[in-house]
Amino acid sequence: MRPTVHDIAEKAGVSLATVDRVLNGRPNVRGVTRARVEAAIADLGYVRDVAAANLAKGRVYSFTFILPAGDNPFMRSLEAEVRGLARQAAVDRVRVGVVVVPPFDAEGLAGAIDAAIADGVSGIAAVAVEDAAVVAAIDRAKAAGIAFVTLVSDVAQSARDHFAGVDNVAAGRTAGSLMARFVAARPGPVAVLAGSMRLRDHRERLEGFQARLGADRLLEPVLEGQDEPQTVQRLVGDLLARTPDLAGLYSLGAGNAGLVRALSDAGGAGPVVIAHELTPETRSGLSSGLIAAVLNQDAGHEVRSAVRVLKARADGLAVHAAQERIRIDIFVNDNLPPEAGQSGADVSSVPQ
């Protein structure tokens, strides 16, 4: 039979109330008594049934996801996954809310984090902007005992518990390896289009890309389209007009509807293009031959991973690293999944 709290109390020579205080980390237990209870727990091999304990207490987890607003298709798919999970999670006593803030707005993100802290949530997951104000807000959340997960783009110098996203340096290296193969016989330069170099994931992708392709082939400076399709269309159109020998273009951010329009308007063979995230726009680019390859991360996996980690941290439990590793999927025109299954099934993948 599995040991119970009654067995712990008997072995340690204490009351059930004292055992409960030790198990829940509450104060008003003398050090020597706490040590005796913990020794009894270890000797008996007691493993706490956290789910049963939470059910008995009527505990409800309250998680807030903070996402950037705008028409970034990947972020909207991430939001759709969160809202879909919220409808299912209620059965498991999990309440999930969504807050949207302007993209790349560090102060707005920090304010949303502080608002979630004030609401007394159990955990926060956010697409992060690397900024001192955001780091300080994350650290305030942790100081308040709130679990914190960064999504898609990390803020590693903060006290956050976990990052739910791909290894972006590895993603950049993968893009660089593909680009090197695709443009091997083409002597022209390669350009890079980012959303904002304030985002850690964009900087890390560029770092990996440069390491594999070689900086001597890259055009500078990096174009920053702010993930806005109109801005991206203008920047890429100007780039193609002034660089007729452009061999390749790596789009490591969003705004790819504008990228596809600019490539289509230019006509001709055009550069080899590698982009991120399988969206309707990049799917269209792959199908038409305007885009050679797309690197994708599974939005659903990231959201489910974030919730698992937030629950584990709220309960003081360990996180299973292998389960939470987000893979990098590679799509070309030949292995596009059906439109209803854009979550990464039946694709080539590069393990992290």
Image: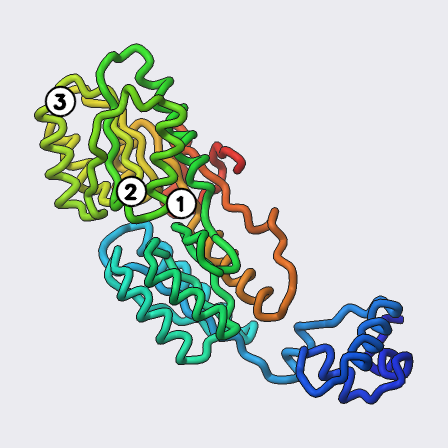
Q: Residue at x 63, y 68 (%)?
A: 316
Q: Earlier in the sequence, mark 3 or mark 2?
A: 3
Kindly identify which residue carries mark 3: 243
| Residue 193 image offset from top left, x and y in percent | 24, 36
Callout 1 secondary element: loop
Work out which quarter of the rendered image holds the N terminus and state it. bottom right
Q: What amino acid is labelled 1 in the image? A: Gln
Dot 2 amino acid type: Gly
Nearest to N terminus: mark 1 or mark 3: 3
Label 1 to label 2, Cα distance in Å? Answer: 18 Å
Q: For this view, does 199 lie left or right of residue 297?
A: left
Disc 2 marks which residue? 253
Q: Secondary structure at mark 2?
A: loop
Q: Quadrant of residue 53?
A: bottom right
> Going by the image, does 303 lie left or right of 276?
right
Residue sitting at x 23%, y 28%: 191
Cα separation, mark 1 vs mark 3, equals 34 Å
- Please tell me which residue is depicted at 36% across the width and 68% down the height of the picture: 98
Asked which quadrant contains residue 283, the reply is top left
Q: Position of residue 328 (x, y in %)?
A: 46, 38
Quick check: 350 above or below 38? above
Q: Is residue 51 above or below residue 56?
A: above
Query: Tag 3: Cα neighbours inside 10 Å, few (<14), some, or many (≥20)?
Result: some
Residue 242 in view in this figure: yes
Residue named by callout 1: 342
Q: Amino acid at mark 3?
A: Thr
In the image: residue 284, left or right of residue 86:
left
Crowding at mark 1 (Cα within 10 Å: few <14, some 14-19, many 20+): some
Tags 1 and 2 in contact by the CB under 8 Å rule? Answer: no
Q: Nearer the viewer, residue 201 or 328?
A: 201
In contact (CB < 8 Å): disc 1 and disc 3? no
